[in-house]
Image: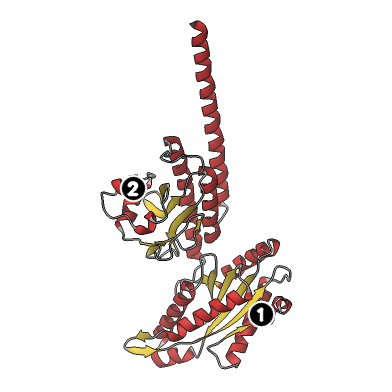
Amino acid sequence: MKQTSRKSKKTLHDSAIESYEKQLYDYKQLLEISKSLSSVLEYSTLIESILYVCMCQMRVLGAGVFVLKTFDSDFFTLDSNYNGLEPLDTISYNIPITHPIVSFLAEHNVSYTLDEFEKAFGGEDLLEQIASLNPSLIVPLKQKNHLNGILLLGERIDLGEGVSYNEYDRQQMMNIASLSAIAINNASLIEMTTTDMMTHLKLKHYFYTVLAEKMEFSQMNGLPIAVMMLDIDFFKKFNDTYGHACGDYVLQQVAKTIFDGIRGQDMAGRYGGEEFVVMLYNTEASAAMLVAERIRNEIEKKTLSYENNTMHVTISIGVAVCQPDTPMTAKELVEFADQALYQSKRNGRNRVTLAATPSTSAEE
């Protein structure tokens, strides 16, 4: 009897040690996660890091996060911020910041399964954007009472059907969510200080900094990178005819069309005056030309109205591509795109021209 009791105590003792060791390991993991996320200030890279961390730490096959595309966006959007999930083509994955789900998650620092969320939300219709992704866990990314994002975890690898997360797992996930929310807030502050307030596109200096980093990474990993230079045709006539306020309105509308025409992993900047610049990450010449032509066509067919005046705008574009086996600097790549833009202007405007860089010559 005593021997059985000793064995039982030893088993409990061993289990306690094992539990403490796991907690210590997890705390060390949280420290490393905190260091990793706090060192990433580029928004799209940060989101990729958060997804990777959550998938590894929670052992899920996929993850996605709804975030504000810009610091003053009206929607939390999924965009390309997912890995391993399967969004439906028939659904627009945007959640208005005014939707009751947003305020609900901002008030409750709790993770939910899909069933739990439907019940906790008071029986109101669950947004199809969330339900269609079939998440195993819905996690608010909160800093204080402010919601910075909505994280969805996919299928858990090590849990059988009908088995849910335990309390320890959920607490660990909320710790990661808290670190992620702080990192997103910091990145948003950087976003504000590196953004042109009129067009909401990146400032020229910051664009060059990120482009140089992306080009270095692309060359090391065998990825092409493209740059577009864009210029509004006959922009001066809008200022001269309708005033500078109208010119500002035209700049804003063109900038919005450019921004809406690129992916989250790309970047658009205001180069100066009526000129814009875009980085297309991991994009070959043919795809870059398609993006440029789509943006040019979208701007051409728009009808702008300003103080009862109807206007049409066109834009000229130059495209340049850097292949990983033809290294060049960020300045050189932009200069190639600028030369192609000049060709578009000289050949009649409202067109797209591909620069004859060493990379494109090698492709041909």
Residue 32, image x and y in percent?
58, 43
In this view, the residue in front, 295 or 278, is 295
On the image, numbered disc 2 is attached to which residue?
Answer: 117
Please tell me whether mark 2 or mark 1 is closer to you in this view.
2
Marks 2 and 1 sit apart, C-alpha to C-alpha, by: 52 Å
Dot 2 lies on which element?
helix
Q: Residue 187 location, x and y as percent?
A: 50, 58
For badge 1, the amino acid type reads Phe
Residue behind mark 1: 336
Side (left or right) of 336 relative to 54: right
Q: Earlier in the sequence, mark 2 or mark 1?
A: 2
Q: Which mark is residue 214?
A: none
**From this viewpoint, is residue 276 visible?**
no
Q: Residue furthest front?
A: 161
Is residue 224 toward the left or the right of residue 47 in the image? right
Residue 94 lies left or right of residue 212; in this view the side is left
Query: Mark 1, residues whose alpha carbon is within 10 Å: few (<14), some, or many (≥20)?
Result: many
The quadrant holding residue 24 is top right
